[in-house]
Every structure is written in structure tokens, then in C-alpha cells.
Image: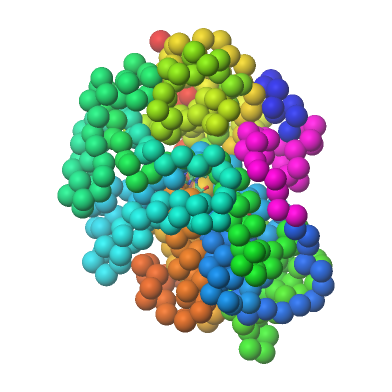
Amino acid sequence: MSQGLAETDAGKEPMKNQNTSHGLWAATASPRPELGPLPGDTSTDVAIIGGGYTGLSAALHLGQAGRECALLEARDIGYGGAGRNVGLVNAGLWLKPDDLLRRAGPVYGERLLEVLGSSPDLVYQLIAEHDIECEALRNGTLHCADTKKGCRALQVRSAQWQARGAPVTLLSREEAAARTGSPSFLAALMDERAGTIQPLSYAYGLARAARSAGARLFEHTPVTSHARASGGYELTTPHGTLTAKSVIIAVHAYPGFAFESTRKSMFRMNFFQFATEPLPGDVLETVLPTQQGAWDTNLILSSYRRDEAGRLIVGSVGTVHGLAHGLHEAWARRTIAKTFPQVGEVPLEYGWHGAFAMNGNNLPRLHLLDDKMVMVTSFNGRGIGPGTAFGKLLAQYATDGDAERIPLPVSRLETLTTRRFWELFYEAGARLYHFFQRRL
Ligand SMILES: Cc1cc2nc3c(=O)[nH]c(=O)nc-3n(C[C@H](O)[C@H](O)[C@H](O)COP(=O)(O)OP(=O)(O)OC[C@H]3O[C@@H](n4cnc5c(N)ncnc54)[C@H](O)[C@@H]3O)c2cc1C
């Protein structure tokens, strides 16, 4: 068993969460902001539910606009996807730009592409403006192909982004090998808008910045129910009631307590990562030598990146619960051996997983649960840029009530009838795929 997991199991991590959840990111994050639970009954203008990127960005931008707001997080800041992800700050969605335009339609498509295409600008601007220590690098990311089909997909993606003037370059096999330090890839798409961060540190930094801007933030404060009250809403928590004129719900793939039922509108895709111990200097120079984060074009995709200490982190679809842990850890070892043979045998220090929210057409969703109770969800595998950008837009919406600024139609929270099928498909499919992949 990897050493980091044993530490997590022993409960040494500051996060009060289940085992194998935040792994390397909890161990190497910048200091946690010191926040307590809601100290009794109180009121505010805007209540924000969820302490991930969306909620924190909303709190920061409301605070900066001089609006009174209070954020309630059920567990710890970054407990959800924000503290578990790969840390690739990418532009756009997983969808190719033309597919996004087709699916979002003429009214919203262009604006959505604009907001999501420039979302890394917002992320890195906030990091600079608020001195957020989060291992931030903005030197592009690499979308890699290890099959001919993948190469064709990259060509199409590259042409579509280039037609929109985006700084993306299709790299040849030799160039991809030089950038990745791996012989495995036939081509790669370099996107200069993108970069990498330590995801949990970014969440902590946003929390600190939001607090400095005047937002009140509370941890260990789950919203267990909500009701209309005169002039707004009453949110019940175990520590007291928060009364607010409007509410932003930012619970994404981790809806709990009062928002458990929103789970039915999405399918949750799990993604795990394993991190090696820091690699020796001479080996490190040859692994992702220019430090771009990378992922591949496969349906069950793999991700590759380094952290600041020189660990190699590989990830893919699935969990590291129970039996799946051994299977996926073995996959991670084979993947490192095949993709970066120069690394050799190296201990894995951490393994963890998390979930993100997917839906039928792979577009984010905007829901009005009530007059002044708004929710954005389903970032479909992206969330650092989208969460930060939508948080800012939701803050503006809470201020001027103009939903037109948000480049999404208001939709009903509907049950995704194929939810269980897709969850099983990806979880079981990933196990089967990983059992066989990279054995030869
Ligand atoms: C393993 C993994 C890899 C990923 N890789 C990337 C990547 O490389 N790049 C990228 O852009 N995106 C990535 N993502 C997606 C990204 O992490 C998410 O889209 C993003 O975190 C969503 O942010 P959020 O603020 O909307 O929600 P979250 O970060 O999930 O936060 C939601 C919060 O709401 C809280 N909450 C829920 N219910 C309640 C309640 N009743 N009361 C109070 N609080 C409540 C939860 O505790 C949680 O902290 C990845 C996700 C995972 C899991």
C-alpha cells in the first residue's frame, strides 16, 4: 500500500473527510485559512452554499463589489472537486469548440466559448492580484494522442481553435516527445492559454482573498434545509440559521444535506491520481521537462503532470476505494513504466480520487431553484476556469439580477434517467480497461 494512503487512513490529514480523498494536495497545500462554523443565527444579503471555486469566486467578487455575503461550507474549504483535481487550468470545455457552439446554440454558444476560453486569464489574474501561493505555472498544457484516431481528433480541435485565433499549436511526434519526455505520443496539442496549479492551495487562496474583501466564510456548516422567509430565504444549519435576500448554490458534484436531490440531474465521474515520491534531479529533467500538464485523447483518459517538489502524478477514470485501489495502483505503475521508462521503479507516495459532474450534452447548467436561488453546475470535467468564471458571473447576477450576463439558458433541474448506467459504465469500464491496458 502506498505510504501516503496509510497516513491519510491514520487521520493525520487536517481534512475531516473520508479516506483516500485529497492525497498529495492536502499534504502539500499552503496553510489553511482558519475558519469556524456559523456562530448562531445571523443574516446577510447573499448566502453562498459550497466552498469550492464557484462559491469562493462568488464570495470574493461580491466582497469586492461591497456586497454583504456569507459562504457556508458543509465540511472544509476545497472538500469537493476543488481539493482533489488534476490542477490543469484549461480553456474551454472537453467539447471541441464547434461542438460546443452546436450544442449551446447561437444565443449562448459564442458567449460561452468566450467566457470559458478566457477563464484561465481570470484564474491567473486572481492568483497574481491576491498573491495566491499555489504552485502556479502558466506555460501551456498538452493534449496528447497515442493513437491515429487521437491524432485526427487533435487536428480537428487544433483547426477549430486556430480559426478562433486561440494560441494553440499542433506538435509533431518529435516535438511531443521533446515536450513530454515520453516516446508514447504521436502528436500533441499545446494550448498556451493554459497552465497548472496546486488546486487546493488555489481554493485556500481564494478563501483568504474573499475574507480580506469582506466576505464571511464558515466551515463545518452544512445547509440542512431551506425555506422562504420574509424578503428572502432561511437556511438551516446545525449551528444556527442564516437569513439571506438571495442564495447562490455552488455544490457541483458533492451536493449533500439539503441539496442531495440535485444529484439526480447529473452523473458523477470518478477520477483517481497517484503521485510518486520526488524524482531525482537527473531523471526529473527528462520527465515533462518544460513542466506542462498533459492528458490524452482516450475515452478513459490518462493525465500526467508534475508538482513543484518534482513528483510525477498520473491519473485516470475510476476510484481508489477497496478492491479498485490495487488494480488502479498497478495500472499507475505500468503507466509510469511504459510512458516514462526513464523513471524506473519509484515508490508511490499518495493515491486519491474525486468526482466531477457530467450530464447529457456536456454543457454546464444554470438552474433557478426559486426566484432568487440560483445554481450553476455540471462543468463536465473542467471546473477551475469555469468555476472561477461562473462564480464571478453569479456574483454580478446577485447584484443586478440580470441573468442575461450568464451565457447559459435557465433550465429545469431534471432527472437524468441514464445516470446510473453512465456511472456504472465508466466505473466498471475503467476497471476493465485498466486491468488490461499497458500490459504488453
Ligand atoms: C479528480 C478530479 C480531477 C479534475 N481535474 C480537473 C482539472 O484538471 N481541471 C479542471 O478545470 N477541473 C478539473 N476537475 C473538475 C473540478 O475540480 C470541478 O469542476 C470543480 O471543483 C467544481 O468547483 P465547484 O466550486 O463548483 O464545486 P466543488 O469544488 O465540488 O465544491 C462544492 C462544495 O459544496 C459543498 N457542499 C455540498 N453540499 C453542501 C451543503 N448542503 N451545505 C454546505 N456546503 C455544501 C461541498 O462540501 C463542496 O466543498 C476535476 C475534478 C476531479 C474530482
Most common secondary structure along the magenta stretch: loop
Instruction: Please state if 171 lies on the left or on the right of 38 as rendered.
Output: left
Most foreground residue, 148 or 385? 385
Q: Residue at x 21, y 52 (%)?
A: 164
Q: Please tell me which residue lies in front, 40 or 286.
A: 286
Q: Is residue 334 visible?
A: no
Is the residue 170 above or below the residue 357 in the image? Answer: above
Q: Which residues are magenta?
A: 9-34
Q: Write the residue at 70% across / 48% down.
A: 32
| Quadrant assignment for the N terminus | top right
Q: Can the viewer see residue 352?
A: yes
Residue 236, image x and y in percent? 74, 72
Q: Position of residue 83 (x, y in %)?
A: 60, 45
Q: Quadrant of residue 225?
A: bottom right
The extreme bottom residue here reads 230
Relative to residue 177, is residue 379 depicted above or below? Answer: below
- The residue drawn where x is 75% and y is 58% is 35
Would you say 226 lies left or right of 88 here?
Answer: right
Q: Position of residue 435 (x, y in %)?
A: 50, 21
